[in-house]
């Protein structure tokens, strides 16, 4: 599937430090460094039945910061993202609004692409839909079947979590916690005939009126977790660097995706990292609750996407927070100051700011610290009467390049 156009990213004069990141599986901030120059990232993408909201934007921006931090540290980055273009919520919404599910998915995916472009998010090298990935998914189900990890309930196929001795390593949840969350996140613990209530569906036999694809197991469609497992392993290979997504995916989604790989005798990600949940009006922003602030709606009312980006960057990616319009108004004013300061050309010394910003981002993507360092430079530059002896003749240019390359904000 086509991704979106990548923004131009200026090269920086300085190289950033090696990046460290919080890993959910170990509970520690760990180095993302490993052998070689390549780093690889898989981020769980949208289910395209509605427009991109601030929660989605926050997650994709967090991993855009990682992509940028790696590039600024001199690495090449293989970035893959999926789009869940066939799944229950998409089919339900299509039915409800009387639109063909393919048309709904294509329309919302296209809107998402324009939102990502406007927010200057670097596009993935591979943007893979579930539908186009059915052959890969069937191959992986075959591998799991040969490993004895698959069984039938009626005509549906389930994955046996007991086939993975490492099951639970990613989320580090107790069985009780898993059992409590599983039904809220698409699981069906009570279905008769399952070997373990936590076993997830990997192939759903054709239901009347729903799309299906032929398979050796009968016509049907893929389960959700196997989609990400198969796509990540195909395009990034076993043992890729980071699996990313929002914290709503810690369990079961990322646990099951990893488990499928383990049961097939493969490593999955080295590090599991999650963005915090963005709320609005007291609750997690979600399509099912309907408490949404859409990126496209703000863009349609002439809001500068760079101001949206700045609002998100002012929160550490791992924290949960609430969107308010005041933060947006404030970001609009801040951006105006930043633009005024870099337009002066000459300003306070830029080199220490470059070092602080790259260092903050390499330290578990500490964007608020990076933003504060830029703000301090802006305050010093705008507060300077005339040209101080220590002023830097090309500071404006350097800071603009830094803010663009590291934070993704074009001034
Ligand atoms: N297609 C699946 C992932 S394979 C999915 O979760 N789709 S989604 O459209 O519901 O979410 C897309 C991405 O945004 C996921 O990484 C999800 O974790 C993240 N996300 C969803 N809601 C929020 C929110 N309120 N705050 C932060 N991130 C969110
Ligand atoms: Zn996923």
Image: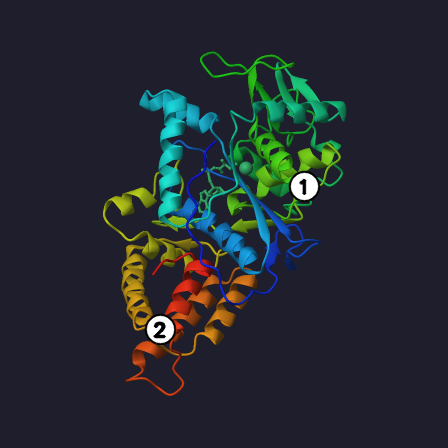
64 versus 144 height, above or below: below
- The label number, if any, that marks residue 378 in the structure image: 2
Q: Which residue is mark 1?
A: 268
Q: Picture coordinates of residue 30 (x, y %)?
A: 65, 58
Q: Secondary structure at mark 1?
A: loop
- Residue depicted at 44% across the width and 28% down the height: 89
Q: Is residue 293 visible?
A: no
337 versus 404 height, above or below: below
Image-based side of 59 in relation to 331, left or right: right
* Residue 198, quarter of the rendered image: top right
Real-space Cα distance between discs 1 and 2?
43 Å
Q: Picture coordinates of residue 407 (x, y %)?
A: 44, 59
Image-based side of 75 in relation to 389, left or right: right
Q: Picture coordinates of residue 192 (x, y %)?
A: 63, 20
* Residue 111, quarter of the rendered image: top left
376 versus 323 height, above or below: below
Number of residue marks = 2
Ligand 2 in which quarter: top right
Q: Secondary structure at mark 2?
A: helix
- Residue depicted at 46% across the width and 54% down the height: 320
267 versus 147 height, above or below: below
Q: Picture coordinates of residue 94 (x, y %)?
A: 37, 23
- Residue depicted at 61% across the width and 26% down the height: 137
- The label number, if any, that marks residue 147 in the structure image: none
Which of labels 1 and 2 is toward the front?
A: 2
Quick one: label 1 or label 2, which is nearer the N terminus? 1
Local crowd at mark 2 within 10 Å, few (<14), some, or many (≥20)?
Answer: many
| Some atom of ligand 1 lies within 8 Å of the CB belonging to the residue at label 2 | no
């Amino acid at each position: 599937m086509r991704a979106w156009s990548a923004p131009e990213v200026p090269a920086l004069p300085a190289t950033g430090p090696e990046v460290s990141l919080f890993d959910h599986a170990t509970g520690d901030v760990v180095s993302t460094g490993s052998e070689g120059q390549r780093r690889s990232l898989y981020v769980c993408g949208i289910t395209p039945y509605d427009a991109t909201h601030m929660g989605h934007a926050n997650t994709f921006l967090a991993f855009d910061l990682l992509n940028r931090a790696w590039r600024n540290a001199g690495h090449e980055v293989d970035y893959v993202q999926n789009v869940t273009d066939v799944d229950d919520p998409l089919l339900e919404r299509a039915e409800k609004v009387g639109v063909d599910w393919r048309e709904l998915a294509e329309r919302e995916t296209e809107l998402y692409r324009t939102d990502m472009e406007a927010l200057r998010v670097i596009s993935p090298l591979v943007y893979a839909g579930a539908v186009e990935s059915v052959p890969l998914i069937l191959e992986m189900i075959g591998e799991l079947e040969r490993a004895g990890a698959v069984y039938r309930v009626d005509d549906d196929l389930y994955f046996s979590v007991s086939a993975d001795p490492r099951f639970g390593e990613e989320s580090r949840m107790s069985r009780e916690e898993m059992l409590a969350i599983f039904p809220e996140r698409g699981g069906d613990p009570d279905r008769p005939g399952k070997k373990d209530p936590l076993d997830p569906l990997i192939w759903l036999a054709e239901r009347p009126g729903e799309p299906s694809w032929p398979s050796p197991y009968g016509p049907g469609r893929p389960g959700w977790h196997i989609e990400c497992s198969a796509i990540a392993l195909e395009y990034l290979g076993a043992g890729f660097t980071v699996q990313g997504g929002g914290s709503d995916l810690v369990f079961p989604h990322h646990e099951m995706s990893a488990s499928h790989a383990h049961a097939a005798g493969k490593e999955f990600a080295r590090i599991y990292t999650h963005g915090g949940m963005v709320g609005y009006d007291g609750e997690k922003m979600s399509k099912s609750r309907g408490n949404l602030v859409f990126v496209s709606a703000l863009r349609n009312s002439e809001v500068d996407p760079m101001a949206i980006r700045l609002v998100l960057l002012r929160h550490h990616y791992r924290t949960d927070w609430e969107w308010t319009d005041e933060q947006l108004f404030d970001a609009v004013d801040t951006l105006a100051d930043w633009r005024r300061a870099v337009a002066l050309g000459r300003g306070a010394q830029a080199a220490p700011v470059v070092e602080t910003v790259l260092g903050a981002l390499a330290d578990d993507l500490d964007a608020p610290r990076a933003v504060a360092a830029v703000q301090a430079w802006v305050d010093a530059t705008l507060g300077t009467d005339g040209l101080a002896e220590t002023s830097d003749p090309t500071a404006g240019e350097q800071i603009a390049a830094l803010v663009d390359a590291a934070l993704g904000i074009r001034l």
